[in-house]
Amino acid sequence: MRILRPNEHIGWLVAFLTTFTHLPQTLLTVHPPGESGTSPGMHNGISVAVVAWLTYGQFLSA
């Protein structure tokens, strides 16, 4: 078993963040009264994920 490099840690973290960002929107849709717009948690999570992916890309190109 090998140790992950720092950029790999960032990649895994961002992958999980991007995946679980959709959870607030899913909960908003599933629970009554249904979908009433987009969850602020989803917007915030996607914004953080985009910045994190850009940071990860910079680590890979360095």
Image (cartoon, helix red, strand yellow):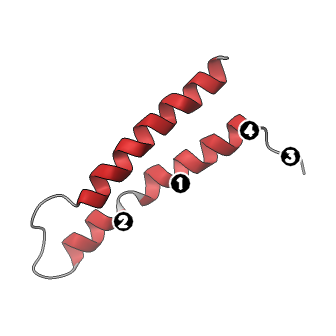
Q: Earlier in the sequence, mark 1 or mark 3?
A: 3
Quote the CA–CA distance across marks 2 and 1: 11 Å
Image coords of residue 57 (percent x, y): 56, 26
Q: Tell me the tag on residue 16.
A: 1
Image coords of residue 1 (percent x, y): 90, 51
Q: Tell me the tag on residue 6.
A: 4
Q: Secondary structure at mark 3?
A: loop
Q: Secondary structure at mark 2?
A: helix
Q: Earlier in the sequence, mark 2 or mark 4?
A: 4
Quote the CA–CA distance across marks 1 and 4: 16 Å
Crowd around label 1: few <14 · some 14–19 · many ≥20 (10 Å): few
Badge 4 amino acid: Pro
Crowd around label 2: few <14 · some 14–19 · many ≥20 (10 Å): some
Instruction: Give the residue displayed 49% in from the left and 29% down from the top.
Output: 54
Q: Secondary structure at mark 1?
A: helix
The answer to whether marks 2 and 3 mark residues whose Cβ atoms lie closer than 8 Å is no
Crowd around label 3: few <14 · some 14–19 · many ≥20 (10 Å): few
Q: Is residue 42 above or below residue 55?
A: below
The residue furthest bottom is 32
5 sits left or right of 7 in the view: right
Q: Tell me the tag on residue 3.
A: 3
Image coords of residue 48 (percent x, y): 41, 44
Badge 3 amino acid: Ile
The answer to whether marks 2 and 4 mark residues whose Cβ atoms lie closer than 8 Å is no
Q: Secondary structure at mark 4?
A: helix
Quote the CA–CA distance across marks 2 and 3: 30 Å
23 sits left or right of 5 in the view: left
- Mark 3 or mark 4: which is in front? 4
Q: Tell me the tag on residue 23.
A: 2
Badge 2 amino acid: Leu
The answer to whether marks 3 and 4 mark residues whose Cβ atoms lie closer than 8 Å is no
